[in-house]
Image (cartoon, rainbow, N blue to C red):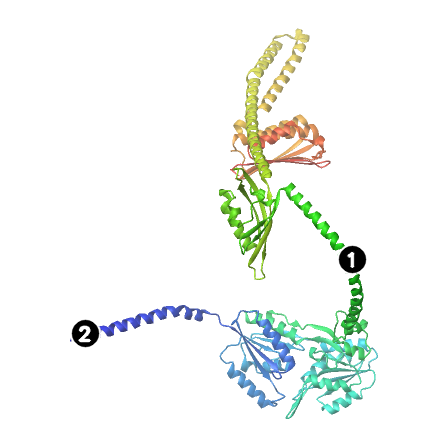
């Protein structure tokens, strides 16, 4: 029984282990499945071409179209291509088979937008749209905007049209051949389709009264060549397209054009870029490459959700383009071509063709001349070399003298072997004797001050990576004296970047460092002196305010009271006199009036020295009272504007602003000649600002005569003590503006 129990236990352990392993695998693969499930569905783009896959126009279009799609992330767009080939598979039955094939292949809804690359492809899509792609938008290229009639529009259409290209090309041909009387229009399709002929006829309808239009449509090639060969003078040919594909025989549009051009008795024009170089003079040409990129942009916009009906139909980019060889053949000057034209296949001139031969011949002649000069030059060079050697010797002596004068030493450190070559002046900079031999970097590092040792080592290591060293460190001479050196060097490396050596200079900057230390000490002393002066200025202003307050109180409480008592006594005496004593009363009245004026003057002086209104009612009321009294005394209108809540200010801030306003308005009365002034106070949580402006005569602050007086200097010091800003602006003939800003919080 025991063996069976052990076997059952063993089986349970195996089952439990496999179950745990399966759970781990599920946990590991779960994020992958989750990401795959949440990945967005790629945008499906189907392009329906006319003709085979190897048709040149289709190849150019597809290359450009795919290049434009590559701007999207990999996997974001899926490209599908199908090809309508009625030339190889003619008949309605083949068309229906193509319809059924497309319906079955794309029935799974993988397509987001369908592209019709030609008018024929567009006609096919619109005809069978309800069967194939009833819910998909269509982006098309056509010669004109399609007329839908009763066909279902579905999600909508947009696209690109090359409208009037044939008409514009005929106009262009007529401007180059103004005596033209006839035009031959060549069209031919493999399945004898006349769609292109209908489009061309509609565009050229306006020329029927000016020209004899001969449509050579779907003619056999021999007959067509005979027609163009016998074309009369004053004729032009418009090549639209000609091709056929029969069992054992096929001819593409370009090859057909080449055969026709060889026999044509009139200049040929066309609108396809691929026709250039096969016999056409030129025309308003559109490029299948540019068209591919343009349609890819429209298709991606539609695939990403933009409604086709919200995208206006665009025009294909056409450029007047010409074949230079055909222009020469038909005697057409480039001066007669329209603006912004392009000329292809321009053959090089004589210089372009034989440039290198001409250059080679000139070079050979030049070599002979140069050889003669070189022989003479070598003789002269020997003389100059001797002179240069003498000059180098002299320059070396001057360099040595300059190094000694500038206390500069040079070094060359062989990094591979860790050996340093020092100049004679380099050794004394490190306290070494002239007879001391050169050595490894350790000999140099031993002299560096212990506090600078790590920084010096780090600078050398950084130089190996960056290629340059620029550092300063101290060295200790044998006599224990400390000297400062400025070290600059550059790394010379192998081609693979491995350091080979470092060359550089050492400069003794001990005197400069001592001067910098002395300057720093001087600046510190100056800073302390300035702080002391600032402290004393603050104390002086406080003492001044205390003295003003004391004098104002004495004037108001003592002198003004005594003057008032005298005035009261004189008034009482005047009332006790009878009318008979009128002369005496008149004499008493005059002193009484003078005493009243004196009392008012003492009161005003007391108020100016110390405003009790400012102390008890705050800055706004004090300024209102002062501005009112100032206007009455000086005849200057004061516009006072108080913005924000400025009542509960610290007393030192309110007093500072009050004194600034007092002094500024007095200066306006003395110097500006203004009839009015503005006083504005604005306050927020951060700061309070006082602005005083007039439109007086102003002054030039840069002139020496306009330097600030003691009053302005005192005001500026008051503001600075409160960490505020003091900005005075003035211009002759414009006026003066003073702006004071004092922070209400710590800035």
Q: Is residue 731 left or right of residue 432?
A: right
Q: Is mark 2 on a helix, strand or loop?
A: helix
Q: Quadrant of the N terminus?
A: bottom left
Q: Is residue 608 above or below residue 646?
A: above
Q: Which quarter of the picture shows residue 603?
A: top right
- Residue neighbourhood size for the residue with mark 1, other residues' Cα within 10 Å, grouped as few (<14), some (14–19), many (≥20): few
Which residue is located at x 57 percent, y 23 percent?
544
Q: In this view, does 340 lie above or below 452?
A: below
Q: Which label was assigned to residue 5? A: 2
Q: Which of 136 and 405 is in front in this view?
A: 405
- Label 2, label 1: how many angstroms apart (C-alpha)? 113 Å
Q: Which label was assigned to residue 380? A: 1
Outermost residue, top side: 580
Residue 129 position, x and y percent, is: 56, 80
Q: Which of 683 and 478 is in front in this view?
A: 478
Q: In this view, does 383 lie above or below 234?
A: above
């Amino acid at each position: 029984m025991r063996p069976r129990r052990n076997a059952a236990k063993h089986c349970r352990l195996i089952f439990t282990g496999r179950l745990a392993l399966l759970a781990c695998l599920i946990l590991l693969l779960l994020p992958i499945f989750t990401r795959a499930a949440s990945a967005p569905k790629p945008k499906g783009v189907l392009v329906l071409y006319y003709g085979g896959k190897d048709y040149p126009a289709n190849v150019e279009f597809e290359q450009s179209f795919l290049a434009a799609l590559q701007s999207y992330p990999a996997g974001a767009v899926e490209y599908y291509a199908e090809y309508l080939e009625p030339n190889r598979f003619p008949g309605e039955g083949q068309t229906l088979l193509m319809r059924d094939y497309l319906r079955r292949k794309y029935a799974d809804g993988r397509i987001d937008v369908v592209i019709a690359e030609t008018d024929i492809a567009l006609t096919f899509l619109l005809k069978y749209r309800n069967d194939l792609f009833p819910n998909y938008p269509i982006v098309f290229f056509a010669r004109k905007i399609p007329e839908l009639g009763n066909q279902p529009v579905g999600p909508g259409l947009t696209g690109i049209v090359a409208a009037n290209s044939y008409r514009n090309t005929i106009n262009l041909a007529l401007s180059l051949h103004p005596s033209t009387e006839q035009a031959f229009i060549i069209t031919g399709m493999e399945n004898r389709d006349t769609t292109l002929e209908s489009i061309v006829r509609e565009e050229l309808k306006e020329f029927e009264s000016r020209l004899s239009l001969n449509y050579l449509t779907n003619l056999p090639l021999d007959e067509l060549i005979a027609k163009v060969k016998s074309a009369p003078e004053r004729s032009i040919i418009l090549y639209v397209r000609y091709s056929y594909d029969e069992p054992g025989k096929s001819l593409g549009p370009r090859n057909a054009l080449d055969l026709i051009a060889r026999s044509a008795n009139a200049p040929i024009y066309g609108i396809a870029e691929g026709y250039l170089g096969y016999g056409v003079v030129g025309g308003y040409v559109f490029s299948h490459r540019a068209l591919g990129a343009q349609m890819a942009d429209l298709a991606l916009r539609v695939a990403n959700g933009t409604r086709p009906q919200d995208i206006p139909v665009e025009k294909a980019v056409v450029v007047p383009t010409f074949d230079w060889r055909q222009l020469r053949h038909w005697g057409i000057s480039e001066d007669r071509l329209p603006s912004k034209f392009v000329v292809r296949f321009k053959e090089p001139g004589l210089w372009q063709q034989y440039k290198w031969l001409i250059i080679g011949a000139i070079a050979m002649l030049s070599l002979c001349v140069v050889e003669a000069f070189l022989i003479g030059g070598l003789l002269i060079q020997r003389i100059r070399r001797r002179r240069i050697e003498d000059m180098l010797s002299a320059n070396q002596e001057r360099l040595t003298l300059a190094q000694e004068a500038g206390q500069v030493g040079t070094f060359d450190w062989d990094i591979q072997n860790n050996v340093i070559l020092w100049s004679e002046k380099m050794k004394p900079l490190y306290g070494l004797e002239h007879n001391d031999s050169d050595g490894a970097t350790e000999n140099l590092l031993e002299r560096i001050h212990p506090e600078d040792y790590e920084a010096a080592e780090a600078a050398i290591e950084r130089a190996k990576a960056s290629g340059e060293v620029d550092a300063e460190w101290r060295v200790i001479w044998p006599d224990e004296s400390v000297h400062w050196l400025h070290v600059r060097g550059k790394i010379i490396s192998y081609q693979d970047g491995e350091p080979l050596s470092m060359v550089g200079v050492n400069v003794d900057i001990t005197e400069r460092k001592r001067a910098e230390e002395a300057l720093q000490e001087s600046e510190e002393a100056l800073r302390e002196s300035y702080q002391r002066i600032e402290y004393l200025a603050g104390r002086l202003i406080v003492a001044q305010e205390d003295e003003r307050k004391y004098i104002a109180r004495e004037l108001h409480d003592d002198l003004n009271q005594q003057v008032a008592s005298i005035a009261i006594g004189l008034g009482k005496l005047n009332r006790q006199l009878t009318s008979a004593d009128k002369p005496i009363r008149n004499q008493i009245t005059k002193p009484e009036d003078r005493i009243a004026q004196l009392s008012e003057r003492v009161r005003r002086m007391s108020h100016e020295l110390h405003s009790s209104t400012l102390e008890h009612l705050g800055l706004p009321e004090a300024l209102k009272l002062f501005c009112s009294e100032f206007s009455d005394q000086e005849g200057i209108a004061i516009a006072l504007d108080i913005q924000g809540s400025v009542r509960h200010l610290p007393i030192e801030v309110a007093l500072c602003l009050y004194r600034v306003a007092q002094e500024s308005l007095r200066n306006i009365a003395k110097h500006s000649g203004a009839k009015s002034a503005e006083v504005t106070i604005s306050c927020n949580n951060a700061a309070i600002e006082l602005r005083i402006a007039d439109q007086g005569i102003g002054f030039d602050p840069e002139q020496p005569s306009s330097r600030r007086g003691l009053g302005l200097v005192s005001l500026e010091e008051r503001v600075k003590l409160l960490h505020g800003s003091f900005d005075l602006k003035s211009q002759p003939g414009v006026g003066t503006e003073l702006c004071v800003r004092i922070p209400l919080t710590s800035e």
